[in-house]
Image (cartoon, rainbow, N blue to C red):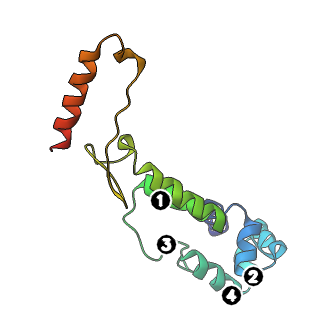
């Protein structure tokens, strides 16, 4: 893969489109698209530097300047997050925060915490109408878990 293809791949992995990226760095999209089609060798040095600065990549190799220790999943999440506009980013932050309150998605297995303190929840269904002893057993188990 040559540098031009590598640059295009980096841009598209972090932004929804080349056009969106060109607006961000204040380079005409036609100029950037032309460079990505014909090769960036003919592009002005100041523009290449501006692109590399925004993408945080080395101007010679187009490799990331600082290697991070993110897993592939973490990097994918971050790349998708960076594609969002401000409203989308705020929604993503809220939704991920909501997921942390659901036991199935977190490492915490015995308690749910909020800014208001501990939340204890137990759902009772019609199954217990015919067998009240079962509900009492579940309540005892739940109280036992709460003592951990």
Residue that label 1 marks? 75
Tell me how far mark 1 sits from mark 3, CA to CA. Answer: 13 Å
Q: Earlier in the sequence, mark 3 or mark 2?
A: 2
Judging from the image, what secondary structure is the residue with disc 3 in? Answer: loop
In the rendered image, is residue 9 in sight? no
Q: Is residue 55 left or right of residue 113?
A: right
Judging from the image, what secondary structure is the residue with disc 1 in? Answer: helix
Disc 3 versus disc 2: nearer the observer:
2
Q: Position of residue 69 (x, y in %)?
A: 36, 65
Residue beneath the point at 54% across and 77% down: 56
Q: Is residue 62 left or right of residue 33?
A: left
Q: Which is more toward the observer, 108 or 114?
A: 114
Q: Earlier in the sequence, mark 4 or mark 3?
A: 4
Judging from the image, what secondary structure is the residue with disc 4 in? Answer: helix
Residue that label 2 marks? 26
Residue beneath the point at 31% across and 43% down: 120
Tell me how far mark 1 sits from mark 2, CA to CA. Answer: 26 Å
Q: Earlier in the sequence, mark 1 or mark 2?
A: 2
Tell me how far mark 4 sits from mark 3, CA to CA. Answer: 19 Å
Residue that label 4 marks? 45
Q: Is residue 6 left or right of residue 97?
A: right
Disc 4 versus disc 3: nearer the observer:
3
Q: Which is more toward the observer, 46 or 105?
A: 105
69 over 135 or under it: above or below:
below
Task: Sort mark 4 into few (<14), some (14-19) or many (20+) by Cα contacts within 10 Å.
Answer: few
Find out whether the residues at labels 4 and 3 contact each other: C-beta distance under 8 Å.
no
Q: Which is more toward the observer, 49 or 114?
A: 114
Q: Position of residue 86 (x, y in %)?
A: 64, 68
Disc 2 versus disc 4: nearer the observer:
2
**Dot label at residue 64:** 3
Tell me how far mark 3 sits from mark 2, CA to CA. Answer: 22 Å
């Amino acid at each position: 893969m040559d540098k031009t293809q590598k640059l295009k791949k980096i841009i598209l992995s972090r932004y929804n489109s080349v056009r969106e990226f060109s607006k961000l760095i204040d380079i005409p999209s036609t100029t950037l698209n032309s460079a990505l089609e014909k090769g960036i060798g003919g592009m002005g040095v100041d523009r290449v530097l501006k692109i590399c600065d925004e993408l945080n990549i080395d101007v010679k190799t187009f490799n990331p300047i600082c290697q991070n220790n993110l897993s592939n999943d973490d990097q994918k999440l971050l790349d998708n997050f960076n594609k969002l506009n401000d409203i989308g980013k705020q929604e993503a932050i809220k939704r991920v925060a909501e997921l942390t309150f659901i036991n199935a998605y977190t490492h915490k297995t015995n308690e749910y915490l909020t800014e208001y303190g501990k939340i204890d929840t137990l759902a009772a269904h019609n199954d217990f109408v015919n067998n009240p002893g079962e509900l009492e057993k579940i309540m005892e188990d739940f109280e036992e878990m709460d003592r951990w």
